[in-house]
Image: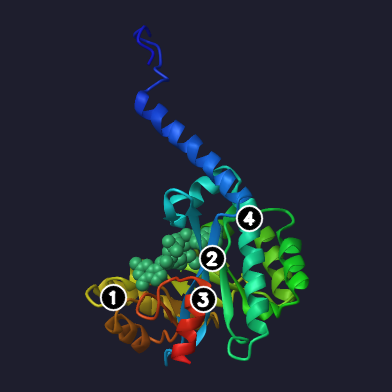
Amino acid sequence: QAKNAGRNTLRFFDPQMQASIAARAEMEHALRKAIDDQQFALYYQIQVDRLSNPLGAEALIRWNHPEKGLISPAEFIDLAEETNLIIPIGRWVLETACAQIKAWQKSVQFRRLTLSVNVSAKQFNQHDFVSQVSACIQGYEINPGLLKLELTESMLLNNIDTTIEKMNALQAIGIRFSLDDFGTGYSSLQYLKRLPLSQLKIDISFVRDIAIDENDRIIVRTIIAMAKSLNLNIIAEGVETEEQQRLLFNKGCINYQGYLFGHPVKIEEFEALLSRVV
Ligand code: C2E
Ligand code: MG
Ligand code: MG
Ligand code: MG
């Protein structure tokens, strides 16, 4: 602490700030070690159609910390972005997802499942993102139509022309795109129609109170109308109750993801769940 600092001197060493800087540095160090020691795992959450038939899964990363146990992405993705560690992490996610698609492709039961993968802004903005993804597809010899990349509105806005170029290049090799957390960003129809998307994902914040909040019902109806006019598939995230599902269905949303159908789980558990529902 800068005890002797004069009246007009900035105090840089606020102990609380210092503690959080130390915690951050420690977390960054742990994250680097996690990459080296492969402490990450992908969990799989089922996505279903109107009859609750499985369509595929979303891959969601977890950090299996040797002392702290399972850590959710909400706790480390931001730091990973700030420190660029999201680059090796994102590459690992993509590799692991493609390896999983490969494994499913060989099975009669699972060969049609799609796998959605979250892509971060830093990852997408890398100049060689397109070649990274296509190399992965080729390396694993997978059907590119089974891989869906989840992007968010905010990451696409910055440099729209480059974004469109990259998306077009990936779409040309058969990869599909879903716009995640839809409705929380600022995209207009005007620019949405320029993006080669195949799916809009209604954000959980509109699903949560759909049974009690008329405004959310109106928003959901508008999103669905928008998706239809753009010829896009639509899926709702965060569906926890049958009532939410019914309301979504009545408004024209027929694909769902949420705890009502299954939590994100390890691959063994995911495949066991599918064996029960199929
Ligand atoms: P997201 O892509 O919007 O993922 C959906 C989140 O909602 C997941 O949280 C999922 O576990 C949670 N969820 C699913 N169904 C329900 C439900 O019925 N109720 C509620 N309350 N929540 C539900 P999770 O796994 O903690 O992931 C949080 C965010 O972290 C993701 O949001 C995504 O933005 C990011 N993320 C996850 N995995 C990756 C990854 O591999 N790479 C990158 N860049 N980001 C990732
Ligand atoms: Mg997602
Ligand atoms: Mg989402
Ligand atoms: Mg969300």
Q: Which residue is mark 2?
A: 42
Circle 4 packing at 10 Å, graded few (<14), some (14-19), many (20+), is some
Element under label 4? helix
In terms of sequence position, does the residue under pointer 4 or pointer 2 come before the other? Answer: 2
Q: Position of residue 189 (x, y in %)?
A: 51, 70
Q: Which residue is mark 3?
A: 268
Q: Nearer the viewer, residue 159 or 264?
A: 264
Q: Which residue is mark 4?
A: 123
Residues at marks 4 and 2, CA–CA distance in whole angstroms: 17 Å
Element under label 1? loop
In terms of sequence position, does the residue under pointer 1 or pointer 3 come before the other? Answer: 1
Ligand 1 within 8 angstroms of badge 1 C-beta: no
Q: Could you tell me the amino acid type at mark 2?
A: Leu
Circle 3 packing at 10 Å, graded few (<14), some (14-19), many (20+), is few
Answer whether labels 2 and 3 touch (C-beta < 8 Å): no
Q: Quadrant of the N terminus?
A: top left
Number of labels in the image equals 4
In terms of sequence position, does the residue under pointer 2 or pointer 1 come before the other? Answer: 2
Q: Nearer the viewer, residue 190 or 123?
A: 123
Q: Is residue 159 visible?
A: no
Residues at marks 2 and 1, CA–CA distance in whole angstroms: 30 Å
Ligand 1 within 8 angstroms of badge 4 C-beta: yes
Element under label 2? strand
Q: Which residue is mark 1?
A: 210
Residues at marks 1 and 4, CA–CA distance in whole angstroms: 33 Å
In terms of sequence position, does the residue under pointer 2 or pointer 3 come before the other? Answer: 2
Tell me the mark number nearer the camera, choosing from 2 and 1: 2
**Quarter of the figure with residue 215:** bottom left
Q: Could you tell me the amino acid type at mark 4?
A: Gln
In terms of sequence position, does the residue under pointer 1 or pointer 4 come before the other? Answer: 4
